């Protein structure tokens, strides 16, 4: 995980490894996120056949390097909804049309794509449940994290046992939104919104952290990457680049 440099508190040190280290106290839990040098990871066909084919090749190359065990890759297609799948052997699908997946299957690698939206990665070592959720402002406003925690509980988890990581994402330094978006959060999370340059600077990562604590996840079990995807060039950023279709990174979570 990127961390603050001791020499200058305003400079982020980005690790050479793709491992995000969002679960520093847990052994055998691997998570990471691709950077620009591996190319875009958007496999949706709205960019055309060649765009999708290149993304598939980029993913294959990246996973061959990063995933050190034999795993089935699960790639939710993501539609900025609160749809969630509890994945088991009898309903296994590699590309579910959802924004969150929870499972107790140990031979899978859960993935998310993103180009500014926070990705939530979660694991309960007691119940052996892992899950991921795509939590852009729409998903966050729809309480997708609450849906994720509910699904963990269905699988036998207790929120106090859940460890939660948040991937690199756009931070309030760059995330300026209109009143229509800010209004979704101003009642419960007013402290996470500041007025800036005629817009509202939304700390979406902070909102997710606050919500996680409300759901019973302990603060010392929540780790958010401090890296902003928009004001660094290590990751793709739709806000910065405005490419259509968007070029995205892929993050992953699996048990070693």
Image (tube, grey):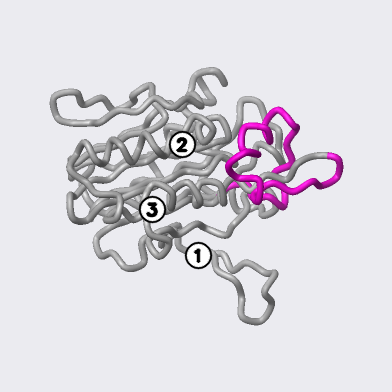
Observer-nearest residue: 82 or 215?
Answer: 215
35 lies left or right of 177: left
Task: Say if mark 2 contacts mark 1, CB within 8 Å.
Answer: no
Q: Pick whichever of labels 2 and 1 is earlier in the sequence.
A: 1
Q: Residues within 10 Å of mark 1 (few under 14, many from 20)?
A: few
Q: Secondary structure at mark 1?
A: loop
Above/below status of 51 relative to 249? above
Q: Pick whichever of labels 3 and 2 is earlier in the sequence.
A: 2
Quarter of the rendering occupied by the C terminus: bottom left
Observer-nearest residue: 106 or 159?
Answer: 159
The residue sitting at the left extreme is: 90
Q: Nearer the viewer, mark 3 or mark 2?
A: 3
The mark found on residue 164 in the picture is 3
Residue under numbered circle 2: 134
Q: Nearer the viewer, mark 2 or mark 1?
A: 2
Q: Is residue 87 magenta?
A: no
- The location of residue 248, given as percent across then percent down, is 55, 37
Residues in magenta, as a range: 169-198
Task: Say if mark 3 contacts mark 2, CB within 8 Å.
Answer: no
Residue under numbered circle 1: 16
Q: Real-space Cα distance between discs 2 and 1? A: 25 Å
- The location of residue 73, given as percent across then percent down, is 29, 37
175 lies left or right of 66: right
Q: Is residue 191 magenta?
A: yes
Looking at the image, which residue is at 46% across and 42% down?
A: 250
Above/below status of 255 relative to 134? below
Q: Residues within 10 Å of mark 3 (few under 14, many from 20)?
A: many
Looking at the image, which residue is at 48% across and 63% down?
A: 1
Q: Real-space Cα distance between discs 3 and 2? A: 13 Å
């Amino acid at each position: 995980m990127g961390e603050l440099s001791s020499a200058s508190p305003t400079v982020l040190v980005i690790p050479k490894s793709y491992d995000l280290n969002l679960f520093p106290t847990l052994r055998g839990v691997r998570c990471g996120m691709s950077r620009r040098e591996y190319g875009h990871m958007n496999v949706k066909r709205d960019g055309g056949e060649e765009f999708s084919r290149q993304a598939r090749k980029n993913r294959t190359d990246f996973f061959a390097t990063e995933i050190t065990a034999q795993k089935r890759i699960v790639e939710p297609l993501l539609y900025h909804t609160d749809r969630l799948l509890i994945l088991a052997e009898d309903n296994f699908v590699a590309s579910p049309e959802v924004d969150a997946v929870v499972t107790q299957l140990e031979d899978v690698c859960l993935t998310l794509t993103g180009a500014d939206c926070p990705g939530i990665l979660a694991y309960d070592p007691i119940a052996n449940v892992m899950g991921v959720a795509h939590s852009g402002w729409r998903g966050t406003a729809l309480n997708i994290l609450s849906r994720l925690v509910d699904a963990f509980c269905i699988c036998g988890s207790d929120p106090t046992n859940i460890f939660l990581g948040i991937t690199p994402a756009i931070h309030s330094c760059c995330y300026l939104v209109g009143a229509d978006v800010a209004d979704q959060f101003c009642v419960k999370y007013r402290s996470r919104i500041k007025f800036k340059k005629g817009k509202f600077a939304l700390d979406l990562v902070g909102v997710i952290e606050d919500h996680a604590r409300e759901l019973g996840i302990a603060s010392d079990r929540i780790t958010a990457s401090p890296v902003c995807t928009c004001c660094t060039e290590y990751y793709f950023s739709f806000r910065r680049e405005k490419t259509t279709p968007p070029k995205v990174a892929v993050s992953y979570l699996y048990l070693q």
